[in-house]
Image: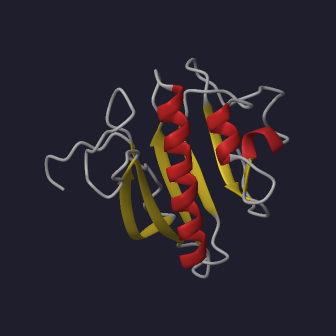
């Protein structure tokens, strides 16, 4: 939308990937109400896009991008529950399509919000399971708390 604030943009290679559909939701008690905030210091959201791989037309994938609250543990945990619920709905709707959650989670592995999103039944941390992580606990540029999550069994390279 023109003039809309897009804090969680998904930047992609437009030659390699064709967007098929997109959506957003807010990390609040009313996730379908744009710009709503309940627990967080700032409005927090998730933007998602479904892509077709142009090089492999039978392959599609879904990417979600978020930025969890930096001050409130309660907001991070409640946001994580909303994200997990929405990922489950996307998995049900787009069966067998890999789903990747990226963002600034403002917490490290082992913290409550991380544990809500990463479990042995639905998602795992690609960065931590990658052989290319050079032993670093997170993909970190200076603000501790960036990870890449995907459903178990999804192929991915961090």
Q: What residue do we see at 51% from left, 61% from top?
A: 86
Q: Locate residue 121, reporting x and y percent.
A: 78, 59
Q: Residue furthest top?
A: 142
Q: What residue do we see at 56% from left, 38% from top?
A: 77
Query: Residue 130: in sight, yes or no?
Result: no
Q: What residue do we see at 62% from left, 37% from top?
A: 113
Q: Residue furthest left?
A: 3
Is 98 rendered above or below residue 94?
above
Q: Return the residue nearer the eye: 87 or 134.
A: 87
Q: Return the residue nearer the eye: 54 or 47.
A: 47
Left-right relation of 14 to 85: left
Is 86 rendered above or below residue 81?
below
Left-right relation of 149 to 129: left
- The figure's colour scheme reads secondary structure
Query: Residue 1: in sight, yes or no?
Result: yes
Q: What residue do we see at 45% from left, 30% from top?
A: 69
The number of numbered discs placed on residues in the rendered structure image is: 0
Is 86 rendered above or below residue 146?
below
């Amino acid at each position: 939308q023109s003039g809309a604030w897009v804090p969680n943009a998904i930047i992609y290679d437009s030659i390699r990937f064709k967007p098929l559909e997109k959506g957003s939701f807010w990390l609040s008690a009313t996730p379908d109400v744009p710009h709503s905030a309940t627990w967080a210091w700032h409005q927090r959201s998730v933007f998602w896009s479904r892509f077709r791989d142009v090089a492999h037309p039978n392959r599609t994938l879904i990417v979600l991008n978020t930025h969890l609250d930096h001050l409130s543990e309660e907001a991070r945990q409640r946001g994580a529950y909303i994200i997990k619920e929405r990922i489950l709905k996307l998995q049900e709707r787009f069966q067998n399509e890999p789903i990747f959650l990226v963002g600034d989670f403002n917490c490290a592995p082992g913290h409550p919000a991380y544990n809500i999103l990463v479990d042995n039944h639905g998602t795992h941390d690609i960065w931590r399971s990658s052989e290319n992580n050079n032993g670093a606990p997170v993909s970190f540029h200076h603000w501790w708390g960036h990870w890449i999550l995907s459903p178990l069994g999804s192929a991915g390279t961090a």
